[in-house]
Image (spheres, helix red, strand yellow):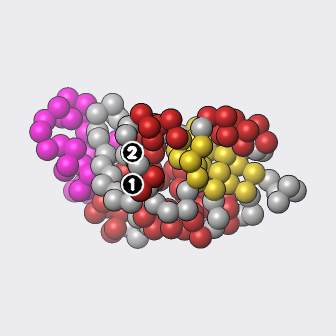
Amino acid sequence: MADNKSMSIIVTKGSLDWAYPPFILATTAASLGLDVTLFFTFYGLALLKKDLDLKITTLGNPAMEMPMMGMHMQMPNLVSALPGVDAMATTMMKNLIKKKGVASIPELRDMAIEAEVRMIACQMTLDLFEYSKDDLIDGIELAGAATYIDVATRSDINLYI
């Protein structure tokens, strides 16, 4: 393994749209032979929960466009303040994901496990948000920032998502 290229990704976001990049990049890199480590901290820790209930928000995401009625509709930030908009946007995104045949986050997470991607949950974040290891999927490690720094300093590629 010491001769393999390696990649580490620090995962800080836990929404549906932000869950895709780390899992897609990790599984792709692992399939190409890289040793991959994902370090989940703060809101990214939610991606390791057994029961996923991921949502998206249009707030602060002015680039978000959804294909609707034969064109791309952009959601103005002001619309995000209306009750139910996040739920509607989440439903639309989940329907689009299904319609286009894109793997779900649980499927991508299972693929990462199968590809032997090392997944580390930040112990400090676990304590801060009062999660238990029982709230998280099996097969992950608990560690702190020092472990991530050790991995990152030895990695060929480091990403922050």
**Residue drawn 25% across the image and 31% down it:** 77
Q: Which amino acid type is shown beneath numbered disc 1?
A: Asp
Q: x, y percentage for residue 74?
A: 28, 41
For residue 101: magenta? Answer: no
123 vs 33: above or below: above
Query: Mark 1 sits on what residue?
Result: 135
Q: Nearer the viewer, residue 114 or 159?
A: 114
Q: x, y percentage for residue 5?
A: 80, 53
Number of numbered discs visible in the structure rendering: 2
- Looking at the rendered image, the quarter that the N terminus falls into is bottom right
The Cα atoms of the two marked residues, 1 and 2, are separated by: 6 Å
Q: Nearer the viewer, residue 121 or 155?
A: 121
15 vs 145: above or below: below
Q: Nearer the viewer, residue 35 or 122?
A: 122
Image quarter for residue 145? Answer: top right
Q: Are marks 1 and 2 in contact (CB under 8 Å)?
A: yes
Magenta range is 64-92
For residue 86: magenta? Answer: yes
Q: From where the camera sits, is residue 128 visible?
A: yes
**Residue drawn 28% across the image and 39% down it:** 58
Image quarter for residue 127? Answer: top left
Q: Nearer the viewer, residue 101 or 157?
A: 157
**Residue drawn 40% across the image and 70% down it:** 101
Q: Secondary structure at mark 1?
A: helix
Q: From where the camera sits, is residue 71 visible?
A: no
Q: Which mark is residue 131?
A: 2
66 vs 100: above or below: above
Q: Secondary structure at mark 2?
A: loop
